[in-house]
Image (tube, grey):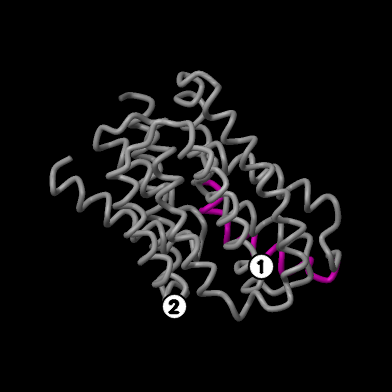
Amino acid sequence: MTPWDAAAILAAGVGAGAINTVVGSGSLITFPTMVALGVPPVVANVSNTIGLVPGSLTGALGYRAELKGQRARLVRLGAGSVTGALTGGVLLLFLPAATFNVVVPILIALACVLVVIQPRLNRWLSARREDTHPHGGPWLWAGVLAAGVYGGYFGAAQGVLLIGLLGSFLDEDLQRVNAAKNVLSLLVNATAAVLFTLVAEVDWPAVALVAVGAATGGFLGAKVGRRLPAPVLRGVIVCVGVVAIVKLVYG
């Protein structure tokens, strides 16, 4: 790894940490960066998941005020996130690498679409807020479980999925929803990271660079992320996602 490669991965980690805290699609920055620098896709995905854990932690800590009163809810939903993450991680490790190369461009395209439509999704959630169940109910738990499977397998834009689910089923404002999303994303990433550390091939230098960058970015995202121009941020994410699709499909 050259110094320029290291600088690129570190910068991608900072961006991903901030984006994950605010929007929830930071893997669309770090994963394509590592693939573009020659890291095999499955190794890049595993290393990315492990490296983003510190950023998820600092992002969640930055939303401490919005997490007040949500402990019991997050314990219940967290069980779904952990179970889903283990399932997704096992699928990643035991399905053929060729499957990942076919599925991931589709998942990235889906993630890009979710990032683009998030403002409309948020407006829809706000419009139906009065119809939500105060505790989420079993359908929310099942949805969080499915999001955990997705997050354990790949994870880009799992935060957008979680915001949609939590906002649909909970009678909470979007800032508290985002705080809960950060905790559940942390649980998914941490669970998958433990699994991958034990049994998967990992690019540890890349992990270290992403971890340092993501921890910094997560802190910054919690502090100033809401001030970033959302259309510009979404545009960057989508452009990087398109580059990743081209790289994976055409090599």
Q: Do residues under tags 2 and 1 come within 8 Å of each other at their CB atoms?
A: no
| Magenta-highlighted residues | 113-131
Q: Give the number of the disc on residue 177.
A: 1
Q: Residue at 39% across / 41% down in the picture?
A: 47
Within 10 angstroms of label 2, few (less than 14), some, or many (20 or more) residues?
A: some
Q: Is residue 65 left or right of residue 219?
A: right
Q: Residue at 60% across / 81% down in the picture?
A: 65
* Vertical comparison of 51 with 21: above or below: above
Name the spot of residue 17 as percent of width and height, x first. Answer: 41, 60
Disc 2 marks a residue whose amino acid type is Lys
Q: Residue furthest left?
A: 3
Q: Is residue 21 left or right of residue 220?
A: right
Say which label, 2 or 1, has the lower sequence index. Answer: 1
Image quadrant holding the C terminus, namely top left
Instruction: Say which element carries label 1.
Output: helix
Within 10 angstroms of label 1, few (less than 14), some, or many (20 or more) residues?
A: many
Disc 1 marks a residue whose amino acid type is Val
Instruction: Say which element carries label 2.
Output: helix
Image quadrant holding the N terminus, namely top left
Name the spot of residue 159 as percent of width and height, x first. Answer: 57, 55
Pointer 2 residue? 223
In reply to whether residue 74 is colored magenta, the answer given is: no
Which of the two residues, 195 or 27, is positioned nearer the viewer here?
195
CA distance for labels 2 and 1: 17 Å
| Residue 67 found in image quarter | bottom right
Which of the two residues, 99 or 189, is positioned nearer the viewer here?
189
Q: Residue furthest bottom?
A: 65
In reply to whether residue 118 is colored magenta, the answer given is: yes
